[in-house]
Image (cartoon, rainbow, N blue to C red):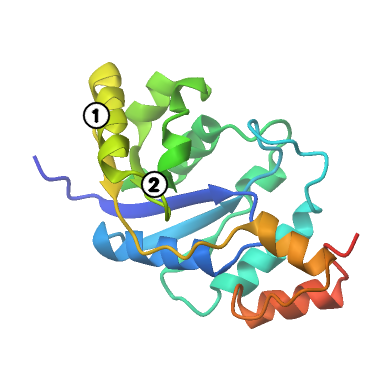
Amino acid sequence: MESNKKRYGIMGGTFDPIHLGHLVLAEEIRDKMNLEKVIFVPTGIPPHKDSINLTETKHRYLMTLLATITNPHFEVSSIEIERKGVSYTIDTINAFKDKFPDVDFYFITGADAILEISTWKDVDELLNACNFVAATRPGFNKSLMEEKIKSLEDKYRKRIYFVSVAALEISSTDIRNRIKERDTVKYLLPDSVKYYIEKNNLYKD
């Protein structure tokens, strides 16, 4: 039966820094999945990445605000930054469900990340709590990815939406390296974020 609930996307990430690839991906998924909005959630302490070298949370949060402010369908949440301890997705989704009981949530992530979902905290509860949207990135074998996602669906008896998007092949790691090497990052991220990075001397060391 078709749900009458609102449909919100959730896009988590370190956003260190946020770039045009993130924005293109979120907008395409919002459009293709008929979502009312996408809420960007900068990670506090990520469980799957080394957090030692992460840029200070206030910078990542403010850059995400700057990058999304011109899109009326985008919002930013500080929920994981404000919450103490490791930022587990299940805790975030449960908090959103408590706050917005009339909403169906669609967690947006890269198709490569979805393949590791078995390692996520409380994965069975998580897959029942929200929908997952696995987006392709350039260079991925679509048929192989569809086969792997099908095996996850069979294992957890939960549909995982697979969406192919024309996401730009931009990475935060590459941007950080370019800034460190004094190479140009123009057209890779919003000008507002580029100016914020310059003003605060981020990624130069």
Q: Which is more toward the observer, 93 or 198?
A: 198
Judged from this view, the residue extending furthest toward the right is 205
Q: Is residue 176 left or right of residue 153?
A: right
Quadrant in the rendering for residue 143: top left
Q: Which is more toward the observer, 175 or 34?
A: 175
Q: Residue at x 51, y 25 (%)?
A: 120
User: Which of disc 1 and disc 2 is earlier in sequence?
Assistant: 2
Q: Position of residue 83 (x, y in %)?
A: 69, 39
Vertically, is 183 above or below 32?
below
Question: Looking at the picture, which amino acid does disc 1 mark?
Answer: Lys
Quadrant in the rendering for residue 3: top left
Q: Which is more toward the observer, 89 or 29?
A: 29
Q: Residue at x 30, y 59 (%)?
A: 35
Can residue 36 be seen here?
A: no
Quadrant in the rendering for residue 166: bottom left
Q: Secondary structure at mark 2?
A: loop
Question: Cα distance, mark 2 to mark 1?
Answer: 16 Å
Q: Neighbour class for label 2 at 10 Å: few (<14), some, many (≥20)? A: few
Q: Which residue is mark 2?
A: 140
Q: Position of residue 172 (x, y in %)?
A: 65, 58
Q: Is residue 148 left or right of residue 55?
A: left
Q: Which residue is mark 1?
A: 150
How many callouts does the rendering have?
Answer: 2
Q: Position of residue 68 (x, y in %)?
A: 54, 71
Q: Residue at x 60, y 58 (%)?
A: 171
Question: Looking at the picture, which amino acid does disc 2 mark?
Answer: Phe
Vertically, is 135 above or below 72?
above
Q: Residue at x 86, y 71 (%)?
A: 200
